[in-house]
């Protein structure tokens, strides 16, 4: 039977390996435990006594200390007090200090292990900068500046980040709730891995504004070879994105997302219900009004209705005054059925028939269906392109928008768009800090 208290399988305690200081070229010489943190006294392992100017051997002159915030051990902030020896050249008199670049960047306040821990905490664990700063026992600005600088170096400035992009999604995003200033940005998402089934969507970029010109400018700034490789652009019903994609990506196919198409039909049904409500009762819906009571049931797919909901709709449509609502509801259900059809060829046929039926011969009283028909006819190619390209949807774009909403809520809002873009790229840009195995 294995005895955990026996020496077998255990080695002598090694604080250098436990604190991962051997990766940083440091060696522990002492420790001090304080109520709120641990302090490790360290020295640089490599002597580095040769002059960098003339190559002569240097003579030890004195020492200086460098304080670095290290990754917390047991969530107790850990501070490294590194003793750095200075040398004077016996030939030219040049003075230099031991190289500590393995431990930290020049003038940095975080060790490389501390910086890696901060990136993992923000990207993988979704912690706030305030929580990371608390774990490192540094100021908020110190942690934020270090994380953003490292994220920019390894992700934002990576020239190969856009190389394999073939399918993109575009959507608007509300990044702040203020009365003044531009509140919207345009997000561009890489959907290539989703279509190929090899991974998840990732945020490519975020640009200020939500206009055709904003998206068009971003596309124009990309290399021509990259634009030629883009095959599909998934989007919502905003014609500005459609026009920009057509002008800058003439060979790419625009795909209108099913979520937004169904939403158009749902909005038409909602407006029709409200119009009929006003025409019959002369007021907005009240809890005792049949149309108001059925407002949520009307937007439920026919195949998901319970027995009680079916009876409610049957009673609702039995009233001839609700015939316009019933007609609009039928169009809404036909659209849902087309998208839920397992056979994409059959689903495409259902959608083609639906577009044709709402584009001609609709009674003038069904104003909502007439408006819907014009939109569907205008974007018919974009709607039908969804059935020809399995796996192409703007749904992952909406999912990333949701992650960014959570990010903004965790941070209690952002005031600086540059910081928000950088944090968003770390959160949803597909970045994963390198995880080194524990020694």
Image (spheres, rainbow, N blue to C red):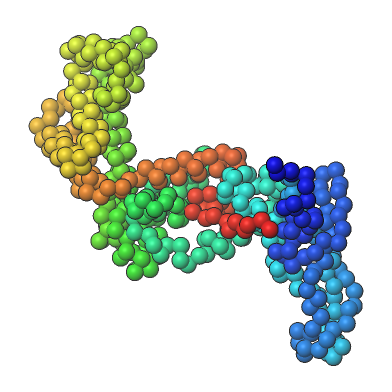
Residue at image coords 79%, 70%? 45
Furthest residue to the top? 288
Furthest residue to the front? 1
Report the label total: 0
Residue at image coords 82%, 61%? 28
* Snapshot quadrant of residue 164: bottom left
Q: Is residue 102 shown left or right of residue 407? A: right
Q: Position of residue 127 (x, y in %)?
A: 62, 44
Q: Is residue 151 shown left or right of residue 84? A: left
Q: Is the residue 254 above or below the residue 319 in the image?
A: below
Q: In front: 19, or 161? A: 19
Q: Is residue 121 shown left or right of residue 21? A: left
Quarter of the C terminus within the rendering: bottom right
Q: Position of residue 269 (x, y in %)?
A: 27, 26
Q: In front: 364, or 267? A: 267
* Snapshot quadrant of residue 40: bottom right
Residue at image coords 34%, 59%? 166
Q: Position of residue 16 (x, y in %)?
A: 77, 60
Q: Position of residue 249 (x, y in %)?
A: 29, 60
Q: Is the residue 35 above or below the residue 291 in the image?
A: below
Q: In front: 408, or 91? A: 91
Is residue 153 at all visible to an observer of this figure?
yes
Q: In front: 71, or 267? A: 71
Residue at image coords 30%, 12%? 308
């Amino acid at each position: 039977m294995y005895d955990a208290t026996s020496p077998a399988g255990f080695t002598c305690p090694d604080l250098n390996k436990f604190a991962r200081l051997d990766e940083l070229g440091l060696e522990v010489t002492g420790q001090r435990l304080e109520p709120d943190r641990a302090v490790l006294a360290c020295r640089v392992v490599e002597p580095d006594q040769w002059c960098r100017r003339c190559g002569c051997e240097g003579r030890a002159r004195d020492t200086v200390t460098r304080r670095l915030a290290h990754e917390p051990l047991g969530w107790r902030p850990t501070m490294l007090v590194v003793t750095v020896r200075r040398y004077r050249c016996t030939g030219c008199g040049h003075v230099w200090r031991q190289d500590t670049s393995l431990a930290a960047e020049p003038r940095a306040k975080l060790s490389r292990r501390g910086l890696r821990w901060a990136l993992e905490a923000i990207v993988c664990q979704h912690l706030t900068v305030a929580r990371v700063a608390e774990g490192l026992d540094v100021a908020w600005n110190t942690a934020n500046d270090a994380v953003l600088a490292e994220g920019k170096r390894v992700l934002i400035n990576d020239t190969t980040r856009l190389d394999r992009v073939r399918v993109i999604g575009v959507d608007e995003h509300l990044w702040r709730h203020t009365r003044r200033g531009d509140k919207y940005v345009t997000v561009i998402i890489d959907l290539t891995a989703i279509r190929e089934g090899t991974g998840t969507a990732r945020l490519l970029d975020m640009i200020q504004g939500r206009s055709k010109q904003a998206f068009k400018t971003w596309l124009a700034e990309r290399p021509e070879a990259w634009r030629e490789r883009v095959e599909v652009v998934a989007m919502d019903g905003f014609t500005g994105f459609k026009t920009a994609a057509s002008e800058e990506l003439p060979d790419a196919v625009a795909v209108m997302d099913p979520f937004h198409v169904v939403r158009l039909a749902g909005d038409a049904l909602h407006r029709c219900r409200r119009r009929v409500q006003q025409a019959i009762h002369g007021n907005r819906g009240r809890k005792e009004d049949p149309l108001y009571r059925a407002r949520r049931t009307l937007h439920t797919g026919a195949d998901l209705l319970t027995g009680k909901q079916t009876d409610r709709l049957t009673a609702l449509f039995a009233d001839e005054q609700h015939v316009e609502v019933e007609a609009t509801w039928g169009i809404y259900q036909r659209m849902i059925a087309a998208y839920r059809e397992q056979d994409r060829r059959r689903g495409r046929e259902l959608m083609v028939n639906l577009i044709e039926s709402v584009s001609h011969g609709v009674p003038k009283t069904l104003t909502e269906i007439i408006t819907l028909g014009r939109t569907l006819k205008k974007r018919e190619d974009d709607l039908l392109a969804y059935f020809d390209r399995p796996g192409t949807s703007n749904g992952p774009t909406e999912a990333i928008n949701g992650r960014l909403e959570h990010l903004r809520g965790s941070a209690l809002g952002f005031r600086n768009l540059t910081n928000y873009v950088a944090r968003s790229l770390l959160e949803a840009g597909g970045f994963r800090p390198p995880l080194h195995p524990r020694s």
